[in-house]
């Protein structure tokens, strides 16, 4: 089967879609709040760190290294410059721990990818290129994917450039991920289809979006995806159950974003 003969191109987000990620960051975040408790309560630490992260995103991008630098900068600000070398060393250790963590797959991922093997499968993830590619390699899933793309951010223009570069028709493209902001709304804007598979924990930044009135196809678990995609009908149209211009409604949950 050639690339053009595949029914769909199905792209997956990586972190918290294929493998666990945010719960590890939450553990570090909780330890960080405790580390800075001599200077501020947990809510204040959370707010100040978020502010620093948002300021640094255009400069450092996403990923563990950016997060670690932001934790150090926020610690200096929160403590009024009093944070000591031992605490800075501890923060650096948080970053190393995140980088060295083993990859733990979401339940059912391998079975889902195998069931969808007749489609053209991709990974589209954002973050540090070295870190993300290392996780793909460590996951044992790399051989199942036609392409792995690591992008600086997930906006409609980025998806559009990527689809054009690979000759992918948006009406035959489905993005699957845990983030409405990054994985769903930009793809719907392009005329593609998207499936939201929520993760129990979502980074605060990913919940900041303007798409609350958009109908979004939502699955309780990734295991439901093969059954959903069986609704696709040859000819370039997606069957009932898919959010976006190509289809609405269906037996799967369609909820406002």
Image (spheres, rainbow, N blue to C red):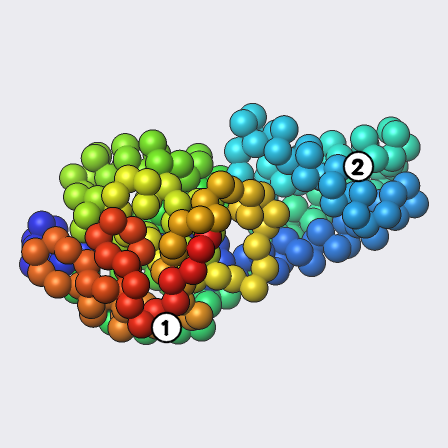
Q: As drawn, which residue projects farthest toward the top?
A: 59
| Image x and y of residue 185, in percent | 39, 45
Who is closer to the viewer here, 195 or 150? 195
Tell me the crowding category of disc 1: few under 14, some 14 to 19, or many 20 or more residues within 10 angstroms, Cα based. Answer: some
CA–CA distance between discs 2 and 1?
Answer: 41 Å
Q: Tell me the SS state at disc 2.
A: helix
Numbered disc total: 2
Say left or right for 232 vs 20: left
Q: As drawn, which residue projects farthest toward the front?
A: 213
Say left or right for 47 vs 39: left
Query: Which residue is located at x 53 percent, y 46 percent?
Result: 206
Query: Which residue is located at x 25 percent, y 43 percent?
Result: 191
Q: Nearer the viewer, mark 2 or mark 1?
A: 1
Q: Is residue 135 visible?
A: no
Query: Which residue is located at x 70 percent, y 53 percent?
Result: 28
Q: Tell me the SS state at disc 1.
A: helix
Q: Is residue 225 visible?
A: yes
Quarter occupied by the N terminus: bottom left
Residue 27: image quadrant is: bottom right
Q: Is residue 172 above or below residue 65?
A: below
- The circle drawn on residue 223 is 1
Say left or right for 107 vs 84: left
Residue 250: image quadrant is: bottom left
| Image x and y of residue 189, in percent | 32, 40
Q: Is residue 144 above or below residue 94?
A: below
Query: Which residue is located at x 33 percent, y 44 percent?
Result: 187
Marks 2 and 1, the one that precedes in the sequence: 2
Who is closer to the viewer here, 80 or 72? 80
| Image x and y of residue 8, in percent | 18, 56
| Image x and y of residue 20, in percent | 52, 62
Who is closer to the viewer here, 162 or 229? 229
Q: Provide the residue designation for mark 2.
A: 75
């Amino acid at each position: 089967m050639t690339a053009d003969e595949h029914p769909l191109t199905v792209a997956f987000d990586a972190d918290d879609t294929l493998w666990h990620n945010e719960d590890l960051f939450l553990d570090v975040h909780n330890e960080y709040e405790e580390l800075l408790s001599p200077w501020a309560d947990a809510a204040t630490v959370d707010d100040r760190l978020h502010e620093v992260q948002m300021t640094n995103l255009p400069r450092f991008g996403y990923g563990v290294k950016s997060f670690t630098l932001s934790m150090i900068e926020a610690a200096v600000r929160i403590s009024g410059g009093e944070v000591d070398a031992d605490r800075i060393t501890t923060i650096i250790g948080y970053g190393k721990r995140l980088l060295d963590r083993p990859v733990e797959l979401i339940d059912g991922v391998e079975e889902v990818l195998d069931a969808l093997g007749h489609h053209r499968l991709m990974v589209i993830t954002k973050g540090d290129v070295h870190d993300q590619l290392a996780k793909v390699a460590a996951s044992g899933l790399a051989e199942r994917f036609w392409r792995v793309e690591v992008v600086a951010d997930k906006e409609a223009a980025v998806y559009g450039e990527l689809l054009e570069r690979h000759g992918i028709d948006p009406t035959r493209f489905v993005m699957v991920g845990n983030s409405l902001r990054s994985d769903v709304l930009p793809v719907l804007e392009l005329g593609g289809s998207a499936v939201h598979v929520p993760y129990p924990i979502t980074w605060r930044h990913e919940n900041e979006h303007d798409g609350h009135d958009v109908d979004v196809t939502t699955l309780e678990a990734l295991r439901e995806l093969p059954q959903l995609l069986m609704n696709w009908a040859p000819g370039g149209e997606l069957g009932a159950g898919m959010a976006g211009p190509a289809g609405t409604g269906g037996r799967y949950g369609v909820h406002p974003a």
